[in-house]
Image: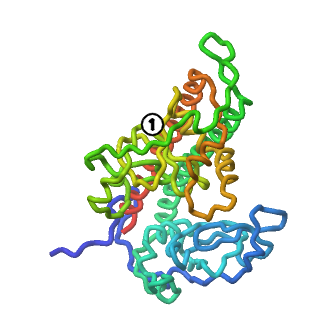
Amino acid sequence: MEKQKNIPRLRFPGFEGEWERSKLGEVCKMQAGKFINASDIFDEERENMFPCYGGNGVRGFTLSFNQNGKYSIIGRQGAHCGNVTLVNGQFYATEHALVVNLSLGFDTDWIFYLLYNSNLNQYATGLAQPGLSVQNLEKVEVKIAPSLPEQQKIAAFLTAVDEKLQGLQQQKALLEQYKKGVMQRLFSQELRFKDEEGKDFPAWEEKFGNELFDSISDKNHNSDLPILAISQEHGAIPRDMIDYQISVTDKSVESYKVVQKGDFIISLRSFQGGIEYSEYLGICSPAYIILRNKVEINSIFYKYYLKTDGYIQQLNSKLEGIRDGKMISYKYFSDIPLPYPSFPEQTRIATYLTALDAKIAAVQAQVDGMGAWKKGLLQAMFV
């Protein structure tokens, strides 16, 4: 059998020959960062302060620094083992990170991508608190592009990909920031839409929760509906659509409540993240309170409103004397006044915010697609 050659599957024209086997310790000199008190790390950049890096990127800013230049930083402990960050300029690295200094003849950016593509977390040791040691990393075998020009070519290309990816991520962040600001203005009525004739919509009314929603306890099902998981991240969603592994008995499922599409659910920690909305027909644990509208509403309007910071603050105000983790009751929910614009204005607001979410989702799809493309490039451009 012919011996497999150390040649990448994807290579720029003009470069030939096998890549060379080496050890990270022959390419890089790694040293742990230094301890810094949490009180010395600040949230905002101030004059004469420098970024402070831990295992998962920038933790804040500090008056001290111990490096000046371009370096790779490797997270060395816990969940951040193997995270690799490229930094440039003056910075401080904590004891939770390893700072990578290069030997002569290697491109700094190329080594960063080599480290990034090497899945360094697999070399962590320890069970309770996995950690990376300099000694172990120095022994890791890597394949090195034989010439500096080839390293620079690869690094320049991947840097351009990263810049495009960062641009998309920034675009998404700006859209999310814009959406948050628009929601504040819409729900405070600082910003109002006009009707189809260009006239003002009627003044908003205010109604209490129990004037708009009933508490529903419908258990009329044959246990054949999907069981819904209730979470702040996904709302109400069938368990088999996410990684949600909790076993239940057939007997207990009989007591589950039916959730209709458009219902709202008061979850155990609604005071932290608002009230959840269901886009699915299913069943959920009887521990949850199911809210169903009793008057005409646009449920998407309230899907957005019940997740606003202002409403969540009102839920929090109902927690006096309640232990952390206890559910907001229907009575407490009913005591909070809710905005009640005309149905056409509710629909205009819901449509606008849904369109914004669609734009954000489209950009996220581009981010995901480019991230997958970058991953494929790394696998093809490195041996």
Relative height, residue 292 to residue 69 (above, below): above
> In this orientation, which residue lies closer to the viewer: 1 or 320?
320
Which image quadrant: the N terminus?
bottom left
**Which residue occupies 62% across, 16% down?**
195
At 71% from the left and 30% from the top, the residue drawn is 189
Q: Is residue 235 above or below residue 107?
A: above
Toward the top, the furthest residue is 197
Residue at the far left in the pictured view: 1
Please state which amino acid type lies under the numbered disc 1. Answer: Gly
Compare residues 24 and 136 and report the one nearer the observer: 136
User: Between residues 14 and 199, which one lies in front from this camera angle?
Assistant: 199
The quadrant holding residue 307 is: top right
Q: Where residue 19 sits: x, y (%)?
A: 38, 72
Would you place residue 26 above or below residue 208 in this image? below
Drawn side of residue 206 relative to residue 369, left or right: right
Task: Please give the name of the residue rendered at 34% of the width and 53% of the height, measured from the top-left corner.
Answer: 255
Residue 73 is situated, as x and y percent measured from the top left of the image, at: 59, 73
The residue beneath circle 1 is 262
The picture places residue 353, in percent across and down from the top left corner, at 57, 33
Secondary structure state at the residue bearing disc 1: loop
Indicate the quadrant containing the C terminus: top left, top right, bottom left or bottom right: bottom left
- Residue 223 or 98: which is nearer the viewer? 223
Is residue 353 shown to the viewer in this render?
A: yes
Q: Quadrant of residue 243?
A: bottom left
Query: Is 278 on the left or on the right of 193, as rendered?
Result: left
Q: Residue at x 59, y 47 (%)?
A: 331
Mark 1: few/some/many CA within 10 Å (<14, 14-19, 20+): some
**Res. 26 visible in picture:** no
